[in-house]
Amino acid sequence: MGLKKPPDGGWGWVIVVVSFLSQFLCYGSPLAVGVLYIQWLDLFHEGKGKTAWVGSLANGVGLILSPICSLCVSYFGARPVTIFSGFMVAGGLMISAYAPNIYFLFFSYGVVVGLGCGLLYNASVTITCQYFDKRRGLALGLISTGSSVGLFIYAALQLELIELYGLDGCLLIVGALALNILPCGTLMRPLEFSKSSPAEKEPVQYSTYNEKEKSLEENISILEKGYSEEKFVRPLTIGDSKQEIPLPEKESATVQSKETDVYKKKVVERKKFCKQLAKRKWQMCQNYWAETVSLFKNRVFSALFISILLYDIGGFPTLLLIEDVARSANVKEEEFVVPLISIIGVMTAIGKFLLGVLADVKFINTTYLYVATLIMTSMTLCAIPFAKSYISLAILSGLIGFFTGNWSIFPYVTTKIVGIEKLTHAFGILMLFAGVGNSLGPPIVGWFYDMTQSYDVAFFFSASCVLLGGLILLFAALPWGNICHRDSTKTAPKPYIYQPASQV
């Protein structure tokens, strides 16, 4: 059996809507954590590098643990994982309202909320890729705008809630809103499996494997019940007319010895089955490692993981620290018509949608498109130290937000490089490195400020990281030309090329 052909519509649009809402509710507060970051600085009086760990962990932990999250999605399915992540995000936000110090926030807001976000993101991306093929870029662009819209709304919402109810009340209300992820998760109906013909080799092997697993589980359950059933059922079936007559001592001893032998035999069989099960699990681990090694033999994939690491180290801190950058530049609060984080959120949503649409255009190479956004992001980061007014910072925030929309085409690029079959595995590995970058970027920028009392050196460092990542990916992709669009049709021409030669 295998996954049914992607319908590219139908219930898939329901998946897009609920994935959009889930990411909106899940990522709204963690992405707009810059508003809370200023409150925590004034509340706990810690350094900017240490306080930045809270927001960086919230956005990095889920990505670091992405391989585990992807395994959970593969094993349990997108629906239960999304529902469970809703409980984690809501619970983490609510208990953060009672944080006595910054270290408690590392766990409640950073780890718990971050892991919930990672589970939900993997679930929504995986099920969307399963439901769409031709329109995958558009679908991924739409669902990824959910986090951007959440960033825009939650930035203003959290500011208003803090003024009305304080920081504690803000976190409690935002956590209650996150509970709406639960009904969204119930609508993520898994794609049905299609039955394939018995002549195909792979489905036959798969079904045989399932039969072995089934017999293994049945035998183990039988073994667990075996001794009790033999002990209580056998004496009642000794004879027809003498069931109530007690057995002689010799016959009773003989029956007990037979039961003991049967029980010992079942114990031996149970040990054998356990060894077979352990051997099978070990084989699965070896296959996972072998598949990981094969992924890194693809140099475009290897360059992609270096690029995403450097990009998140340099590009992510802007989302977290842009409000504090404006305050450090002595921009008056009266000039803030719209929060800078909200501007980033709106432009990120626009960028995700437009870049997702461009990714579906046949003559556009998505790898080169992604590289172009990295180079433009690095140039924008270099201009931030020279911005000393609200208008200039707003323009740069909008540009950074638009180019941050490349997140919508990142799964698309990954799928074209490794294929849909290896997407979950490859995406989990890439998100691991993205999480490391998210976790390290804001604290590094904060430490630069603590040492120099200025963000200038920090943003020059960030720009150089993003530029280096883009150039590495560009040089790795250039020799292969338009690889992203050739991968999907790479295996199809082979039978038609070699079949005439074999017939001759």
Image (cartoon, rainbow, N blue to C red):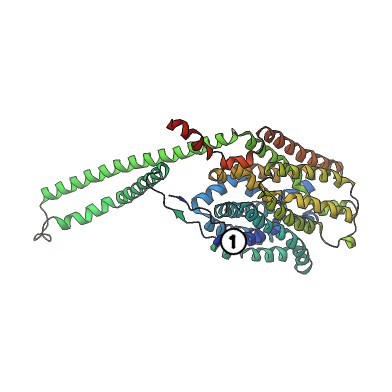
Q: Quadrant of the C terminus?
A: top left
- Quarter location, residue 167: bottom right
Residue farthest toward the bottom in the current orientation of the protein: 164
Residue toward you, 110 or 219: 219
Q: Is residue 331 left or right of residue 311?
A: right
Residue toward you, 417 or 278: 417
- Relative to 235, say whether 263 is above or below: above
Residue 364: tell me if it is visible.
yes
Residue toward you, 421 or 479: 479
Residue toward you, 359 or 361: 361
- Residue 422 % position (x, y): 55, 43
- Quarter location, residue 89: bottom right
Graded by Cα atoms within 10 Å as few (under 14), some (14 to 19) or many (20 or more), the crowding at tag 1 reads some
Q: Is residue 231 left or right of residue 331?
A: left
Q: Which residue is mark 1?
A: 13
Q: Is residue 493 left or right of residue 108?
A: left
Label 1, secondary structure: give it.
Answer: helix
Residue pictured at 72% horizontal, 54% vertical = 354
Residue pictured at 30% horizontal, 42% vertical = 269
- Residue 335 % position (x, y): 89, 61
Residue 47: tell me if it is visible.
no
- How many marks the image carries: the answer is 1
Q: The residue under label 1 is which amino acid type?
A: Trp
- Residue 425 % position (x, y): 56, 43
Residue farthest toward the front in the current orientation of the protein: 504
- Residue 472 % position (x, y): 71, 35
Residue pictured at 53% horizontal, 50% vertical = 72
Q: Is residue 114 left or right of residue 244?
A: right
